[in-house]
Image (tube, grey):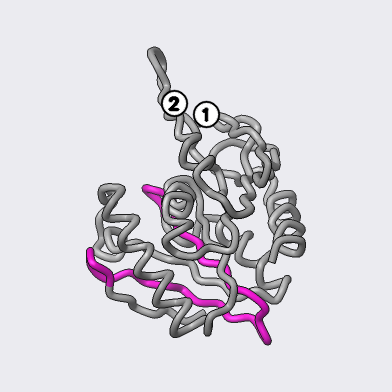
């Protein structure tokens, strides 16, 4: 694995690269709000992509590189992500089709920026559809998924407290055993990602 530092409008991001031999596409994945690029579901998705001759970049947002736990505002995350994907597509992945995505917060960022980054498809691990609350209204983030016009895969734990996104015309939802961490059945997660990538890119 090679780590490449990339300057963004909101500080340095790090891209952890795993390059396939004779790659046919690339996958760029972001981490969750409080986690990092070593999350088991991200690692499993990366392994599935490499199995399909797809190069991988696991991206650390600038706030994490700077040592902060609390995530930056959404527009900062989106701007930094867009800058990273543009740099990777131009100077690392040589214009290969790029699937963007991530887990939880990273999936939301990828959805919001899919058009701006020219994503060929979007991979969402544990998309946080509705914030868990004990009482009161639960605002939905379904509009972020609905706004994506390219193919989308959502891999969601059946016991995820953030809810279960619905399938759509170009959106596939695969339910696996487990909760928001997606740690309970990594084999099923890997199989879902591998099969979807084989059909999509």
Q: Could you tell me which secondary element the residue under label 1 belongs to?
A: loop
x then y, percent, for residue 39: 51, 56
Q: In the depicted view, which residue is nearer to us: 18 or 110?
A: 110
194 over 185 or under it: above or below = below
Q: Is residue 184 left or right of residue 77?
A: right
x then y, percent, for residue 43: 58, 62
Per the image, the residue denoted by label 1 is 161
Which label number is shown at residue 188? none
Q: Could you tell me which secondary element the residue under label 2 belongs to?
A: loop
Q: Quadrant of residue 166?
A: top right
The residue at the point 45 percent across, 47 percent down is 108
x then y, percent, for residue 32: 43, 50
The stretch in magenta equals 8-35
Q: Quadrant of residue 168?
A: top right
x then y, percent, for residue 183: 61, 46
The residue at the point 33 percent across, 69 percent down is 13
Per the image, the residue denoted by label 2 is 132
Q: Residue furthest top?
A: 135
| Mark 1 vs mark 2, CA separation in Å | 6 Å
Query: Which badge, 1 or 2, is on the more N-terminal residue?
Result: 2
Q: Is residue 120 left or right of residue 185?
A: left
């Amino acid at each position: 694995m090679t780590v490449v530092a990339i300057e963004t409008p909101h500080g340095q991001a790090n891209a952890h690269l795993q390059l396939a031999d004779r790659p046919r596409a690339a996958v760029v994945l972001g981490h969750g709000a409080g986690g990092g690029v070593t999350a088991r579901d991200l690692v499993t998705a990366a392994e599935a992509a490499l199995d399909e001759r797809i190069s991988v970049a696991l991206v650390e947002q600038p706030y994490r590189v700077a040592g902060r736990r609390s995530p930056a505002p959404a527009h900062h995350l989106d701007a930094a992500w867009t800058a990273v994907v543009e740099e990777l597509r131009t100077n690392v992945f040589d214009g290969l089709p790029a699937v963007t995505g991530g887990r939880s917060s990273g999936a939301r960022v990828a959805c919001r920026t899919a058009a701006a980054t020219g994503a060929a498809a979007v991979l969402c691990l544990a998309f946080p559809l509705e914030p868990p609350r004990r009482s009161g209204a639960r605002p939905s983030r379904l509009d972020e998924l609905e706004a994506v016009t390219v193919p989308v895969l959502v891999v969601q734990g059946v016991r995820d407290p953030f809810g279960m996104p619905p399938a759509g015309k170009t959106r596939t939802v695969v339910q696996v055993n487990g909760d928001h961490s997606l740690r309970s059945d990594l084999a099923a997660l890997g199989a879902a990602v591998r099969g979807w990538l084989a059909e999509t890119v």
